[in-house]
Amino acid sequence: MAPLHSGMLLVAAPELQDPNFEQSVVLLLDADDEGALGVILNRPSPVLVADVLEGWRDLAVEPDVLFQGGPVSVDGALALARPADPGTPPVGFREVVDGLGVLDLDTPVELVADGLAGLRIFVGYAGWGPGQLEDEVAEGSWYVVPGRIGDVFALDPAELRRDVLRRQPGSLAWASTRPVDPSRN
C-alpha cells in the first residue's frame, strides 16, 4: 500500500458498516505518523450557510448548505476553498494540495471575498489515530483513490461516490454499480 497523503480520497467500501462513514467519500487533508484528518465530502446537511454563518453565504458554492464533515468536533466548522488566483492566496488560507486549502473562518469576509473561486463549509471532521486508518485500509474498509479539486465542490454530492468510483481504472469502476445491500439485488 502506498503511503496515505493529502488530496487522496477514501471511498467507503460496502463492507464498512460504521454509520459515521457508510457510503462516504472522505478527502484526506493531512496524514502522517501521528494520524490522519479529513472531511466527508458527500454529506450535505439541510442547514443553510446563511442560517449559521451569514457573512459566508455569498461565497459558498451550490448547494449552499453546511456539510457534515465527520463525527469529530461537531461544534466547530472548517472551510475548504480554492483561490481565484492560486499565485495569490487570500489571507487566512493554508494550501493543502494543488491549490485547494483550508480557509480560516475567523478571517474577515471582506478580506477574502474577491480572492475565492469556491468555498464549502464542513461541520466536524474525520480523524484517525496513528496507524488506525492504515489498518482500516488494509482490512478493506476503504478504497483509496486520487482526488480532484472538483470533488470538493461537486454540484450533486449524492452522486459523488458513484462518480469517483466510475472514473477509476479496472475492476474498481465496477464497484460504482454495486448495491448498498447486495441481498436486494
Image: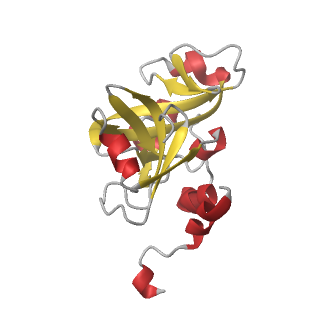
Task: Identify the image quadrant of residue 164.
Answer: bottom right
Indicate left or right for 75 with 161 as reference: left
Question: Where residue 30 appears, x then y in whole percent?
Answer: 44, 29
Residue lying at the far front in this picture: please name it: 1
Q: Return the residue nearer the eye: 32 or 119.
A: 32
Task: Identify the image quadrant of residue 38.
Answer: top left
Q: How many labels does the image show?
A: 0
Q: Return the residue nearer the eye: 49 or 154.
A: 154
**Up-down relation of residue 157 to residue 123 (above or below):** below
Q: Can residue 11 be seen in this view?
A: yes
Residue in the image at 53% along x and 18% along y: 93
Indicate left or right for 90 with 52 as reference: right
Q: Return the residue nearer the eye: 36 or 71.
A: 36
Question: Where residue 91 appears, x then y in whole percent?
Answer: 55, 13
Question: What sort of colour scheme is used for the picture?
Answer: secondary structure
Residue in the image at 38% along x and 34% along y: 37
**Up-down relation of residue 70 to residue 177 (above or below):** above
Residue in the image at 43% along x and 53% along y: 142
**Up-down relation of residue 101 to residue 142 (above or below):** above
Q: Return the residue nearer the eye: 4 or 63.
A: 4
Question: Where residue 56 appears, x then y in whole percent?
Answer: 51, 32
Residue in the image at 49% along x and 30% along y: 55
Q: Is residue 125 visible?
A: no
Task: Identify the image quadrant of residue 113.
Answer: top right
Indicate left or right for 127 with 159 as reference: left
Question: Where residue 96 appears, x then y in whole percent?
Answer: 54, 25
